[in-house]
Image (cartoon, rainbow, N blue to C red):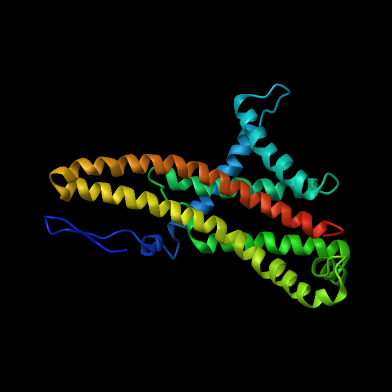
Amino acid sequence: MGTLVLAANEEFVPPGARDFDLPPIFAGVTKPMLLAFLSVVIIAGFFLLSTRRSGLVPSKLQFVAESIYNIPRNLMARDQIGAKEFRKFVPLIVSLFAFVLVNNLYGIIPVLQFPTLSNIGFALALSVLVVYPVYHFVGMRKYGVFGYLKNQLFPPGAPKPVYLLLAPIEFFSKFVVNPLTLAVRVFAAMFAGHMLILVFALAGEYLLVHGGGWLVAVSALSFIGVIAVTFLEALIMSIQAYIFALLSASYIGTALAEAH
């Protein structure tokens, strides 16, 4: 990205990837680390508080908690894993959905204003260190190592010579591509969305302070853009949390399925 030079000879330096590389606050601890920890406290506190006095007729808080719980339970875990085996994976899928959602929504919360998963390390940690080993482990536990590999790499019904090409593709897809795309999808969405908000906000501020004349009026359009993008981001953040948990459940369901 270039620079915008105005009459006042002030240069507008647009935001870039450097703005996502936050320095440590103390003892090597960065803002994204603190936000990730805070999200665990928020999620645990919310569910503990909402279920402390559960009743047959739910309170408003209990109703909200049950609604949040039922989305990943029924629309993700049960539908993708199957009615027989989904229950033991519900805590994982609910936790993934809530964790990604809260950490995404940080990006539009004043003061915090940083989506944790716009840092690729956090997205990779969730995908590679949590989801990836879980779905391969449950598949190997059910079918054995060789049975699981056969199930994943050699789909039944294909001519045997085709397996020479199909098996490497299936291996690359399930053992390399799936965990990476799961992480990159949410990271890219959060990174791009936060970058857009930064561009509109900083450009509006710059035009207002340094623009002069008609450019001051143009700055209002930038601030309107901030509001519009923020509402759009709220929707995208929720969708990305849904997709992350849905795909995680889908990978587990695929690992447990008898045929592909």
* Left or right of residue 26, residue 85 in this image: right
**26 sits to left or right of 100:** left
Position of 50 relative to 194 (above/below): above
Quadrant of the rendered image containing residue 255: bottom right
Q: Nearer the viewer, residue 251 or 111?
A: 251
Task: Locate residue 182, reporting x and y percent.
Answer: 62, 59
Q: Measuring 33% from the left and 52% from the top, which residue is drawn there? A: 199
From the viewer's side, name the closer residue of 189 and 112. Answer: 189
Q: Picture coordinates of residue 48 (x, y %)?
A: 63, 37
Position of 200 with respect to 93 (left or right) is left
Residue 53 position (above or below residue 145):
above
Q: Is residue 51 above or below residue 239?
A: above
Give the residue at x 39% y 61%: 22
The quadrant of the image that shows the C terminus is: bottom right
Q: Is residue 198 visible?
A: yes
Looking at the image, can residue 109 be seen? no
Residue 31 is situated, as x and y percent measured from the top left of the image, at: 43, 56
- Residue at 32% x, 48% y is 200
* Viewer-side residue, 91 vs 253: 253
User: Where does residue 125 sit, x and y in percent of width and height?
Assistant: 59, 62
Q: Quadrant of the N terminus?
A: bottom left
What is the number of callouts on the image? 0
Q: 19 above or below 203?
A: below
Q: Quadrant of residue 17?
A: bottom left
